[in-house]
Image (tube, grey):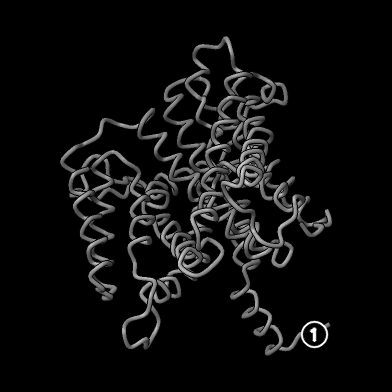
Amino acid sequence: MIVSRARLWKYVRACLVSPAGGAIALLLASLAGFALMNSPWSGDYVALTSRPMRISFLGPRGPDTVAAWVSDGLMTFFFLVVVLEIKKEIVSGHLSSWRKVSLPLIGALGGMVVPALTYSLVTHGHAEAARGWAIPVATDAAFTLPVILALGRRVSAGARTWLMALAIFDDVLGIGVIALFYGAPLDWPALTAAVVITAALILANRAGIRALGYYAVGGMLLWAALLGSGLHPTLAGVITGLCLPAVPSGTGAGPTPLEATASALTPIVTWVVLPLFGFISVGVSLAGTTFGMVLTPVPLGIMLGLLVGKPVGVLGTTLLAARLKIAVLPATTSFSTLFGLSLLCGIGFTISLFIAGLAFDGSALIMPAKIGIFSGSVLSALAGWLWLRFVPAKKA
């Protein structure tokens, strides 16, 4: 069957603007990274991702490889775009009240405490393994959100916003865990500079400054200050996004700074940043691993923390908050849908791998930890997608 050029181009354009298209690009890029790392070309893959890219004026804490620039630099734009979407919902959408905002925050906290307890229970009695308690606490927003976008109408807008907010809260809290328990010593002058820049961005918002250049420069300076402070620099995307004006000017003409920024950056994040991130972060080697290794305390604790602890913590605290009337559940969202989304919260790649590198730096436990992260994340993704795709969601 011959497909006309016009019909093919129409299909390509539909794919480019579809959330499913971005999810497919991320999946293919991730599979490519994993395949290359476990192929005869693994040396070339490692050489590419670890290629030196140091900028001297950023100092010793600056990104120094291709992989570091993607995770510490480009991913800042991902967090910025997601926070802009959440802020839009806070201003006039599904998160427009404290009771609605508190629901994903409470879910994120529960989704951190229960996995940590699960890991600690499994690894009890293993002193060295105890340092990895925080590995399963984080949800990887970069991999979770494309999955729910690809599910389309099977996930309501309110439930999608709830999970987006939960994943961002989770990542920010995870970064806080890194800073408190695994981070380098804080550089107080750089941290002070970050606070001053943040205050300037807040004041600009309050003063009605709408020039995007002001926020762009402020965001870049904030990224550099956070980088030097010892905190994760992607926090700059979160802070800058929260500071961008979300209401029109007095005349009401033209898009708001929030809308203009989201419109410009979303295609770049979808088709460049996330595929690059997937290509690099999923490049985990399985050389020398055996099935029996998965059942040792560290990988088993991580895997159960992600696959069991995450959904139990997220769903349990979410339903408890709703039952106590502290928060309200997303409209038209069933228990079945919430359960499926809670399963997806077990996708923990990025922050989990980062914490594992800090917790087991120079230790033989680093490879078992990566196996646990990979196994738990893949199983959580499959379980969540299959549940949301095939289990009927009865109306709440």
- Residue drawn at point x = 73 percent, y = 53 percent: 337
Most distant residue in the left direction: 189
- Residue at x 45%, y 67% (from the top left corner): 91
Q: Is residue 207 above or below residue 66?
A: below
Whether residue 375 can be seen here: no
Name the residue rendered at 70%, 50% in the picture: 338
Choose between 316 and 366: the one closer to the eye: 316
Q: Residue furthest top?
A: 125
- Residue 37 image offset from top left, x and y in percent: 57, 42
Say what amino acid the circle numbered 1 marks. Ile
Quarter of the figure that contains the C terminus: bottom right
- Callout 1 crowding tier (Cα within 10 Å): few <14, some 14–19, many ≥20: few
Secondary structure beneath label 1: loop
Which residue shows up at 38% across the image and 86% down it?
Answer: 254
14 with respect to 201 (left or right):
right
Tally the marks: 1
Q: Quadrant of residue 331?
A: bottom right
In the picture as drawn, the residue positioned furthest to the front comes out as 325
Where 259 sits versus 379, above or below? Answer: below
Whole-percent x, y for residue 78 in the image: 45, 59
Using the image, determine if residue 310 lies above or below residue 93. above
Q: Position of residue 372 (x, y in %)?
A: 62, 31
In the rendered image, residue 250, in percent from the top left (x then y), is placed at 31, 84
Depth check, front residue: 393 or 228: 393
The residue lying toward the viewer, choosing from 149 and 71, is 149
**Quarter in which the N terminus is drawn:** bottom right
Is 298 located above or below residue 1 in the figure? above
Determine if residue 66 is in view.
yes
Q: Quadrant of residue 343?
A: top right
Position of 184 compared to 193: left or right? Answer: right
Label 1 sits on residue: 2
